[in-house]
Amino acid sequence: KAFHGDGGDSTGNILSEDVEVAVCTIERANILLTQLLDEGREDQLKMVVIDEIHMLADAQRGFLLEVMLSKIKYLLNDSVQVVGMSATLPNIADLAGWLGAALYTTQYRPVDLEVKVC
């Protein structure tokens, strides 16, 4: 069963127990993680995949991503696998160290990364 939308069930639950995959924004992911922790359902969370993890440096949204990663690191320890992806994160080794994570990098790009200044 998929998760989507802004609504919840009649109890205010936004994540029912039969959801297997939730694809969402940083903000929604933080809400879902908080709900799982508050309800003692953290054992349901097995993996968090973060595309564009360089958003940690974003002035508007980065703090929330850091909060979410901190919750995973300090409250859930090794029970949740975190996969972070970025083509532009300059200090990825530092981030991997902070998370206590294995680091995998590659130079392979199916499409060249271009920088354009207008």
Image (cartoon, rainbow, N blue to C red):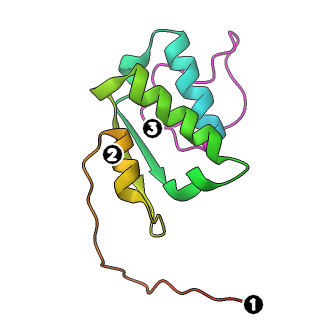
State if disc 1 and disc 3 touch (CB < 8 Å).
no
Identify residue for label 3. Answer: 21
Residue 113 image offset from top left, x and y in percent: 48, 83
Residue 89 image offset from top left, x and y in percent: 47, 64
Q: Nearer the viewer, residue 8 or 94?
A: 94
- Secondary structure under the numbered disc 2 in the rendered image: helix
Identify residue for label 2. Answer: 97
Distance in Å between CA atoms under marks 3 and 2: 27 Å
Q: Which callout, 1 or 2, points at the residue further toward the start of the chain?
A: 2
Residue 106 image offset from top left, x and y in percent: 28, 71
Left or right: where 10 falls relative to 87: right
* Amino acid type indicated by mark 2: Gly
Identify residue for label 1. Answer: 118
State if disc 2 and disc 1 touch (CB < 8 Å).
no
Predominant SS of the magenta segment: loop
Residue 60 vertical position relative to residue 81 in the rendered view, above or below: below
- Secondary structure under the numbered disc 3 in the rendered image: loop
The residue segment tinted magenta is 1-26
